[in-house]
Image (tube, helix red, strand yellow):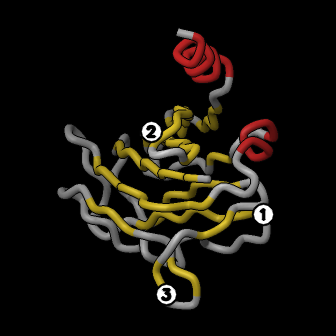
Amino acid sequence: MKRTLITILTFLLLSGTALAAGSSNTYSIAWDIYNNDRVAVITWNWVADDADGSVPDSSLSTIHATLLKFYFADMAETTPGGVTAPTALYDVTLVDTGDEDVYGGKMIDRSATDVETVLPAIDGCLGGRPIYTGLTMKVGGNSVNSATGKVVVIFYK
């Protein structure tokens, strides 16, 4: 009961949003424990601008960045919108404060129709990547007005 209440309160109180004209990029975080590991799942839901197809960047709040410090980024999943899909081969990056892509380019050229998953890459090697700074999710290469999509990233500690 106590763990459920904490999870619900965390979810409700700690969410982030980035907005531009006719577009949005929001995230939420779910915290849990799995096989004795602490797990955080961040879900970004984005809507492209209704005039030019651009998607605003979405940075984690300072609180979330602090809570994720020393977690490891693991699997990421991209899901294109069901009603209005993005441009084929659109790009997703998750960058740290040094503008380094956590997934090493593995989320470039996403499918406009299929759900795709990737692992982080460090110098071409796949595996968990330690997080020690803030993160910003970026969507690029889309020109479809009002396109939608979702990016889910799993972190563990």
Q: Quadrant of residue 128?
A: bottom right
Secondary structure found at label 2: strand
Residue 97 tag number: 1
Seen at 69% across and 61% down, the residue is 131
The 10 Å Cα crowd at callout 3, few under 14, some 14 to 19, many 20 or more, is few
Q: Quadrant of residue 60?
A: top right
Residue 112 picture location, percent across and down: 24, 59
Residue 15 picture location, percent across and down: 63, 28
- Check disc 2 and give the amino acid type: Asn
Seen at 37% across and 65% down, the residue is 90
Q: Kindly identify which residue carries mark 2.
A: 45
Q: Kindly identify which residue carries mark 3.
A: 125
- First in sequence, mark 2 or 3: give its number: 2
- Relative vertical location of residue 80 with respect to residue 119 in this rendering, above or below: above
Name the one closer to the observer, 142 or 92. 92
Residue 113 picture location, percent across and down: 18, 56
Seen at 72% across and 39% down, the residue is 64
Q: Quadrant of residue 7?
A: top right
Residue 95 picture location, percent across and down: 65, 65
Q: Residue furthest bottom?
A: 123
Disc number lying in front (3 or 1) = 3
Q: How many marks?
A: 3
Q: CA distance from mark 3 to mark 1?
A: 22 Å
**Left or right placement of residue 128 versus residue 50 in this view:** right
Name the one closer to the observer, 40 or 76. 40
